[in-house]
Image (spheres, rainbow, N blue to C red):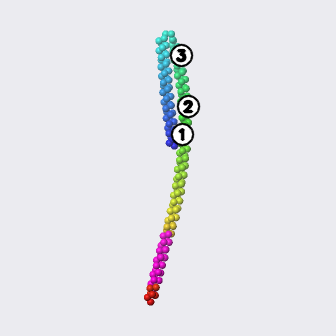
Amino acid sequence: REHAARLVAQAEADVDTNRQVAEATARTLIDTATGRAEALERSSHEAAARTKAEAREQAIEVGRKATAEMELLLSEIEAQHTEVTQEVNIAKEQLAQIDGIAAARRAQLADDVDSHRRMVSRYANTARRELTELDQRLAELGDSVIDLNAVDAEISIETAYESLS
């Protein structure tokens, strides 16, 4: 479960990082294209042979190249985003499966604990009954021993009288 959670967190971090890289790259490409366009425009003013139309054409071409590079980068980022999203979804499914298995295991353990409690309770009740029966038997045996001692005492007294007589 922790591994799946780490995968989800890592995938989300990768998506964020890819977004930041794409934004920075796009800014760089735009800045580069702007810088190139500005440089071309400056050089067109400096060079009398070039016309404004040529400078615009070159700036448009630089813009087209920058746009093509940016579109390529964006398509790569989208592909990575799709892949990361799939990995996140798989990790979430795995996490849900793990949660389901854990819930089933907890339920089974709770059932096992309840079953053992009932069994121990039955054993304890049986042991109490048997102890009560043993106590009663011991009491009965104690009464019998007292009766036998009394009979022995009477016999001894009778034997003593007979030997005296």
Q: Position of residue 49 (x, y in %)?
A: 51, 10
Q: Which residue is mark 3?
A: 57
The amino acid marked with disc number 2 is Ala
Q: Earlier in the sequence, mark 3 or mark 2?
A: 3
Residue in the image at 48% along x and 17% along y: 39
147 within the magenta span: yes
The amino acid marked with disc number 1 is Ala
Q: Which of the two marks, 3 or 2, is nearer to us in this view?
A: 2
- Disc 1 to disc 2, how far (Cα)? 18 Å
Tell me, yes or no, whether the two marked residues, 1 and 3, touch with CB atoms within 8 Å.
no
Residue 68's tag is none
Tell me, yes or no, whether the two marked residues, 3 and 2, touch with CB atoms within 8 Å.
no
Residue 79's tag is 2
- Disc 1 to disc 3, how far (Cα)? 50 Å
Q: Position of residue 82 (x, y in %)?
A: 55, 33
Q: Position of residue 85 (x, y in %)?
A: 54, 35
Q: Which residue is mark 1?
A: 91
Q: Position of residue 147 (x, y in %)?
A: 47, 78
Residue in the image at 48% along x and 11% along y: 47
- Disc 3 to disc 2, how far (Cα)? 33 Å
Q: Nearer the viewer, residue 2 or 38?
A: 2
79 within the magenta span: no
The amino acid marked with disc number 3 is Glu
> Please, which residue is most extreme toward the top here?
49
Highlighted magenta segment, given as a residue range: 134-158
